[in-house]
Image (cartoon, helix red, strand yellow):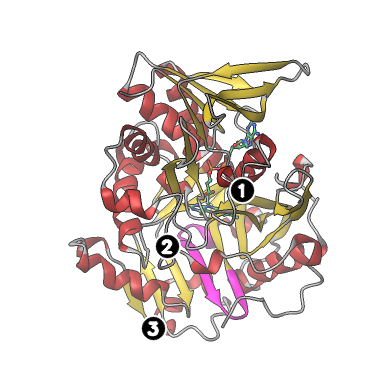
Amino acid sequence: MAPNSLVIVGAGVFGISSALHYKRSYPSATVTVIDRIRENPGAASSDLNKIVRADYPDRTYMQLAIEAQQLWRTDPIFKPYYHQCGMLMAEEINMGKASHENYPMIGQEELSGELLSVEEGRKRFPVFRDAVWDGAPYNYYNPHSGWGEAAEAMHSIFQAALEAGVVFVEATVKRLLLGGEDGKVCLGVEVVKGDGQTEQVVADLTLVAAGAYTEKLLADTAPEWKELQVDGRMVAAAAVQCQASYPPDQEEKLVNAPVHFIGLWHTHGESIPPFKGRLKFNCEVSFVNKTYHEGLSKEISVPPPQQSQSTFSDDVPEGLKQEVANVVKNTYGDYIEGIKIESYRMCWDAVSPNQDFIIDNHPHCANLTIAGAGSFHGWKFLPTIGKYVVQRIEGTLDAALARKWAWDRENEGAACEMYIPSRDLKEIGPFKGLITCEK
Ligand SMILES: Cc1cc2nc3c(=O)[nH]c(=O)nc-3n(C[C@H](O)[C@H](O)[C@H](O)COP(=O)(O)OP(=O)(O)OC[C@H]3O[C@@H](n4cnc5c(N)ncnc54)[C@H](O)[C@@H]3O)c2cc1C
């Protein structure tokens, strides 16, 4: 029987989408979402914008993204915030080619893009006149891809959830409440509110959708209980982003710019065309932040506690600023004159070893479900991911998806291998001109 009450930790993509889908499926259930900040600008799900594409070397995510994109185009909750400007890739990691070949394999040939020679790519998109594509064997362009207004789309689904009857509580979850005869049943959560008061929120089922904070939350709950812990299934990792302005007279050159991905030995990042007078860039060479956890007596990766180290600010190490500036330079060069970086951000997500999500009932703790490990590619699934979480809770999730997103699994394949963290925040020195991703 489906639970009558559900408490969800985290109002990011995984948490809020699950809340809406659960309330739609079970209107009489009490659904409570808790987040430390309402529409938290420090959540990975909040941003200026995020890429929405179905180009995946992994056919399952391709199919899921096609489904989500359909709602981005049509559902009134998402449609106003979706911009289908196309996406151009210049890469040597076979992402474009593998995606191109996958569409016919899943019977969706008409949604595939086209492979272009580098010369054709430059001719088709003069905005990339100066882009550094050294090492790219080809360009891949898909006109069906685009981007979403991130904070706005999150606000829209948040409102839809509230209108459907979901209850929001602004508080920090200190730990999960454990009980039952053997202490292995989750009874809800203990929260601290802004006034410092501690409260308990009990529910039939607790869904942890705490993104990069999942490992710490489970460790804080019962550090001595080994089977409860994340233990390598996902790790808190970040990538550096920046927002840049440009003089108004350059707008004309940017009008038809697509989303651009460069995956080359000298540059590893993405750019999203103008929104609110800003260009956004990511440098996707990610890093962890190892922190000693007293209870576990070992280091785990946890995002830094200062809000300025997960939101757009200037609070980013110099070396990371240089890395993302390299993406800016190698995307537009001198063609767009007067680009000025206005702010930087370390965006923290949870990454699993093969970048598959985790959507599973905890095998050792009753009444506890975990959803997350967005692994730097989870945002585009905002319209649909909650449906799959509900199916996992009900036990109706397709067996192959249940295996793919299981807490315990083999971690076969790789959905987006380039996002695996390769260093620690504290070790990042000055940028030496070569990015650290594998050639
Ligand atoms: C640099 C970067 C770029 C990306 N770009 C894209 C992209 O272009 N396209 C794409 O599809 N995906 C992208 N992603 C991935 C995507 O953003 C994430 O996978 C997704 O947003 C993760 O959602 P989430 O709900 O798991 O986590 P979050 O959005 O981080 O939400 C977790 C929430 O839990 C709350 N929380 C945590 N612990 C507690 C606690 N103890 N008490 C109360 N609240 C708590 C937090 O405040 C937060 O609001 C990107 C990720 C990064 C890092």
Give the amino acid at mark 1: Gly
Name the side, left or right, on which 254 lies relative to 197. Answer: left
Tell me the quadrant of the picture where the C terminus can be found: bottom right
User: x%, y% of residue 432?
Assistant: 77, 79
In this rendered view, identify the residue nearer to me: 275 or 98: 98
- Give the residue displayed 39% in from the left and 56% down from the top: 53
Residue 412 picture quarter: bottom left
Outermost top residue: 28
| Secondary element at image label 2 | loop
| Secondary element at image label 3 | loop
What residue is disc 1 on? 277
Residue range (magenta): 253-268
Question: Dot 1: few (<14), some (14–19), or many (≥20) neighbours within 10 Å?
Answer: few
What residue is disc 3 on? 117
- Give the residue displayed 61% in from the left and 48% down from the top: 277
Among the two numbered marks 3 and 1 on one chain, the one whose residue lies closer to the N terminus: 3
Give the Cα separation between the discs numbered 3 and 2.
38 Å
